[in-house]
Image: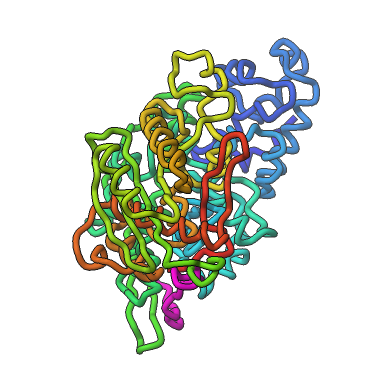
Amino acid sequence: MANPHRQLLRTIRSGRDLLTRTFIHVPGIGRTTEAQLLKRGMRWGDLLQAPRRELSELRIPRHTPKVLEESYRALENRDARYFTRLLPRSEWWRLYRSFEDKALFLDIETTGLSHYYDDLTLVGLYDGTRVTTLLAGQDLHHLPKHLESFDLLITFNGALFDLPFLKNKFPSLNLPPVHIDLRYVLKRLGHVGGLKQIERRLGIRRAKDLEDCDGLMATVLWGRYLRGEVGALELLVKYNASDTTSLRPIARYAYDRLASRVLQTRSTSERLPARPAPRIFVSATKVDAAHLRLTVGDSETVFQLPAPPRPFVTLNSLTARIPNPAKTPRIIGIDLRALETRPTGWALIKGDMAETKIFYTDGDLFRETLACEPDIVSIDAPLTLPEGRCCVRDNCSCRSKGIVRECERILWRRGVKVYPSLLPSMQRLTERGIRLTTRLRDLGVTVIESYPGAAQDIMRIPRKGASLEDLRRGLGAFGVRGRFLNEHVTHDELDAITSAVVGYFYLSGDVEPLGNEKEGYLIIPRLASRSVL
């Protein structure tokens, strides 16, 4: 019987036809049998032409020829979806070179890391030839149309980051049927870490002005763009374009390396050429006082500059909602450190004026806090133990109850990074926080647990790890005044101010307590009150 697919086989280049040597998509054929077939150099066509007796000797299921015929038709018809129904998800990478012309590389930028609290700001797309940039408030709503003609979606860490954001923004979005997350594909090759780390390891070099740019800086750049800094948008788009274009050579590298393992052939180079991805020209310039021209490659768009953002809620508006205030509220925020030899940030907000200090010992913290006669003390540290735990020690029998509290699980589900309260590196901090809280509460002081990072995410203020200057500016835009706006203060003091701000949310009742009665609650601003600084 002549092979009707000989022409198709001739059109597939050498080294790019792993799909036609793949057999694990056939029900009943596992990796061991596939390895035996590959060792014999067999392809789909060989099994289709093999006598039934040979198939029986190889222990090939009787339905194999039918499945391979269907597979050939699917490949000829460019039907990638067919293979997703049969191939294990972990093996979808095998489709890449056979459907490379229908692959789209995607990378997003956001206001932060939490898909629950933060928003999508930019989507970058690369089809192997052209980069397309879609901006929130401008043309982001066109994203569904841009995805229509592609069958493969290639991302890095998209399963945990990009796709949750896309699904929140576009609940009914139809994504390409095949998603290949290079983070997990590369992990199989021993490459772990972020995209920039892996690029450096593979020899990919970025433009000099992008060397210090990362995901956290991208959140800062978006905020600066909203405040009218056109250069910030240019750098952000250039950074995103660099991300999306580097995914293509990395995908080829990963495919070739894994294919050589499957086929048991000689491995390709461990590194890529120094400049494997194209450098995309990006320019953002003001046309006039109200319009901006954005050029990405050969595409040019003119759109209206965004209006300067305004916070949805301010310190004054929170103060106005505090029920029957007998006096100007006095709120203390403490960014606690685990050891008394390390600086603890301390802040008092009275009205809208913040005063900050650095303390080391429990005694100094305790005395200064009591002397201020605070209405509430908000502490950035775990102040309770997980349910069932009696202490922080790992050598106690209570260790079997775990190291994570419910409030931490909730934040994880919302995409907010937080350390478990009894992680070994957190145990001393938790112990100190409980000790300080017990002393204050014994004297009638109201104490709450806060987490400045989560509060800053909700309030759309950059975290200290992204930009101290923008964190300072965000607190000022919220309505907090003080020397911290013009004088140097530490990041510990800025986080202490944020903890004190959470105290204002608490007094106004505009908060969401996370946790349960047995473990206590972590207090965060309520989502409805978040601002867009």
Which image quarter holds the C terminus? bottom left
The residue at 66%/33% (across/down) is 87
Query: Taking the image as drawn, is residue 419 in sight?
Result: yes
Reply yes or no: does residue 309 show up in magenta.
Answer: yes
Q: x%, y% of residue 443?
A: 43, 42
Camera-nearest residue between 433 and 123: 433
Query: Taking the image as drawn, is residue 297 in sight?
Result: no
Q: Which residues are magenta?
A: 298-318
The residue at 25%/56% (across/down) is 207
Q: x%, y% of residue 10?
A: 56, 40
232 lies left or right of 396: left
Camera-nearest residue between 455 and 438: 438
The residue at 69%/49% (across/down) is 77
Q: x%, y% of residue 173?
A: 66, 59
Query: In which image quadrant can residue 288 be found?
Result: bottom left
The residue at 34%/48% (across/down) is 370
User: How many labels sit on residues?
Assistant: 0
